Image (cartoon, rainbow, N blue to C red):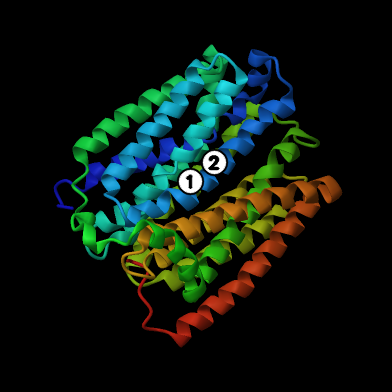
Amino acid sequence: MHSSTKRAPLLLMAIATGLCAGGNYVNQPLLADFSRTFGISDAAAATTVTVLQGMYALGLLLLVPLGDKFNRKTLALTLLGLAAAGHLLATVSPSFWVLVTGLAIAGLFSTAAQVLVPYAADLAPEGQAGQAMGTVLSGLLTGILLARTVSGVLGEIAGIRLPYATLTLALVLVGIALWRALPSDTKHEDSGASPNLGHIYTSMLQLLLTQPRVRTRSLMSALAFASVAAMMATMTALLAGQPFFLSTGVIGVIGLAGVVGAMAARPVGKLGDQGRSGLATALSFSSLIIGWFIAMFGSQHLWAVIVAFLFIDFGLQSMHVTGMAIVTSSVPGARARLNSLYMFIYFLGATAGSLIGALAWNRWHWAGVVGAGMILVAILGAVYIWDSVLVRRNPRAPKPAG
């Protein structure tokens, strides 16, 4: 990408990934409104969360690897357009089942975000792949954090349809801008240079089995995400109850503190480009330890909850950016498949962490959540040690900058 044009496409890619990823969270503040609008139970409304997560996971496995076969500009824009179509269907849905269908389509094709992230690394000038991925990931993470708040505000103004109408329009406009701004994907101009479709999928298991650091770094990020998910799944219950009794709006504002962690993505990516991913990982792990130690005081002190969340979220985002850069640069020509594997394992970590956090809260309340978070970080530490052993055994392994 030429220096005169690289910044605008990178910013647009960050916005696009934020809209795609954030779109999967727009429904969460609207669940009660779904119940009232369509006359369904709260449990039925909550199934939209499961549908979105399940379809997103399916897209990670089936669609993201196609970036190693097809023109990634075309693939990303096609998926982006289909995601917009899903949100449009949700906007005009006359019944709950039409809404669910629209969200299923949107969730599946929102994986356009995970096509754009490694594509940004390939478009970046030499030695700046980590920064490029960090910039786009900052947009993705910020989109997730802002989606709930913006959706809640728009939902209060005009009901469930305005958030989805706004998102649809934004996706269309950004898609058009990307179509005009993104350079041609030269990687696949020679169709003979790309693997066949069957090999795309069968090789993913081979990559997982033959690349030790793909396993260790994916697992490290998944464990970090699990610890954060355990906190996120229970923090609302903590803050809404004794002794804080905070309103939903105030809790939402506290959740926006995670934007600070999202902003860490680009500078951490720069450390990776400089060959200092070991330092970035050490900072990430230390931040998680400090955060969970501070969280011990969260049952009685609001400041402790906020500061702990800042440290833990920073630790996650730093671990995520570093891990993704290392994994996706492990095997030349397989960046999309590696990203698919990494993100699927990362996503499983979040799912497991939410379940662990909920179970710990139901049994031991906040003390149980803190204990679970510390155990997850301790397991992460063990994997971290093993990953360090792998690096010492193979110091000539590919650098994480890609």
Question: In the image, residue 275 lies at what x, y percent?
Answer: 35, 72
SS at badge 1: helix
- Asked whether, in this view, residue 221 is left or right of residue 5, the answer is right
Q: Identify which amino acid the numbered label 1 is placed on.
A: Gly
- Asked whether, in this view, residue 223 is left or right of residue 170, the answer is right
In the picture of the structure, the residue carrying the numbered disc 2 is: 55
Residue 163 visible to the viewer: no
Q: Identify which amino acid the numbered label 2 is placed on.
A: Met
Q: Marks 1/2: CA distance?
A: 6 Å
The residue under the point 57% across, 73% down is 384
Question: In the image, residue 21 lies at what x, y percent?
Answer: 47, 40
The residue under the point 63% across, 38% down is 50
In the picture of the structure, the residue carrying the numbered disc 1 is: 59
Question: In the image, residue 181 lies at what x, y percent?
Answer: 20, 39
SS at badge 2: helix
Residue 242 visible to the viewer: yes
Q: Quadrant of the C terminus?
A: bottom left
- Badge count: 2
Instruction: Tell me the quarter of the picture where residue 190 sits.
Output: bottom left
The residue under the point 50% across, 66% down is 205
Residue 31 - label: none
The residue under the point 49% across, 52% down is 61
Residue 58 or 121: which is nearer the viewer? 58
Question: In the image, residue 6 lies at what x, y percent?
Answer: 20, 48
Instruction: Tell me the quarter of the picture where residue 253 sits.
Output: top right
- Asked whether, in this view, residue 138 is left or right of residue 233, the answer is left
Residue 324 or 369: which is nearer the viewer? 324
Residue 142 to residue 197: above or below: above
